[in-house]
Image: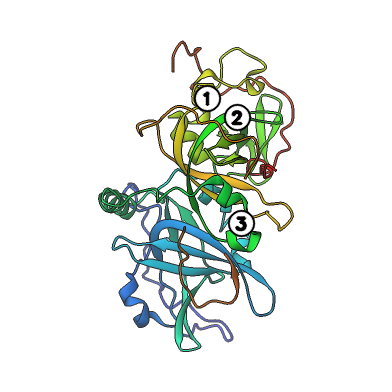
Amino acid sequence: MKSSTPGRFRHPWFGGVTCITSIPDTVTIPTHWFNFIPKSQIPAYINQYPDFLGVFVKLVACIKKNDEPYLLLILRNEFGEDIAISLWKECTDAPSKFNRNAIQNAPAPTVIAVTNVRIMEYGGSLRLGTSSATHIYVNPPIKETDTLLDSYKINAASIPLFGLPVPLTEINEKKHSDLLEKTFTAEASIIEYVFSDYWYQVFCPQCKISTLKQGKDWFCPSHGTITSPTPMYKLMATITDPTSSMTVTLSDNAGQKIFGTTADKLILEGDPNHRKKLPNIIKETEGITKKMKLRITYTSTERNIRFIITDIEDNSSQSSSITTPPSENTSSSNVPHKTPTCSSAQNQPKVKRALNFENTGIDKSDAGPKRARRSQ
């Protein structure tokens, strides 16, 4: 509708009789609103931008035909169907939209919501990819998250969490190309935990980026001063089975499972050197045999292959005594897709509940634990 002033237009939804009234109670207004669609409805949304929700399966590092890298996010819905979404550079390079550490360090199962996903037809098949408006949320506080987790737990109860164990010697002998985008189940003992400076690392609770010590508080490059940061395990471990041994990185998720608690619960009270002293509850798990999931780290190369434990049997699982390896070091499934080339506690001291870190040194570590080198 045109206004009386030449060259200007009146907003079509507001007029002279428009009345704007404030809402006193905003509790009923949702913090997040999504337009989720099931996988079966994807063909009906070509060139549209719906949202998707699923349990995180994995991230696959891929390369486009023009040699530009991107990530392929694999989610699993309540029916056990996998959904593959290409995460383009405009999304993965924006910390406010995508945080890889937050996804991979979250305790499993992790629910992921991806918004404004573009559905397009390419080469006779339908492709899902991020758009300029895409945001990725980890465990969004909505009822659909709870419903999906309940469904996942019911379905997972009848599915073995770990496959048949692969001997460590067999994993050690594989080439880099044979390890890409594969996860192996091993049954091994953790004979020793290793850390170079501190056994845990401090992250921003919002973006999961490593923080720096600043007086009594911590500083996040993205969110400024943080009064209540999130500690995560930063440990390497030497593992062994009857065939061989290797040194691996222990993910925070695996640490929470085997130790039965989060890192902040194990921080000693009143000890200025608590970050350099390994808690007894962690030491007590040395020598226990567990089934665990292993994969190479994303920074591994042909000459420097490094492994990480992504998941492990928790304390309720059956365990046995340590096995001794010989003196010398003597599978999984891929998600098919039609994308360009892809690489695919006893007497425990009193501990803190609210964190007031006494250590004043600056933590300059990366956003994740240091990767362990493969033992020779």
As drawn, the label of residue 174 is 3
Disc 3 crowd rating (10 Å Cα; few below 14, some 14-19, many 20+) is: few
Q: CA distance from mark 3 to mark 2?
A: 25 Å
Measured from the top left, where is residue 38 in percent x and y?
A: 32, 69
Give the CA separation, mark 1 to mark 3: 31 Å
Q: Which residue is mark 2?
A: 193
SS at circle 1 = helix
Give the residue type at disc 3: Lys
Tell me the crowding category of disc 1: few under 14, some 14 to 19, or many 20 or more residues within 10 angstroms, Cα based: some
Residue that numbered label 1 is attached to: 282
- Other residues around mark 2 within 10 Å, as few (<14) / some (14–19) / many (≥20): many
Tell me which numbered mark, 1 or 3, is placed earlier along the sequence: 3
Q: Quadrant of the N terminus?
A: bottom left
Q: Secondary structure at mark 3?
A: loop
Quarter of the image with the C terminus in it: top right
> Tag on residue 258?
none
- Residue at (33, 46) in percent of width and height: 27
- The percent position of residue 265, horizontal first and vertical second, equals 49, 24
> Picture coordinates of residue 129 (x, y %)?
51, 73
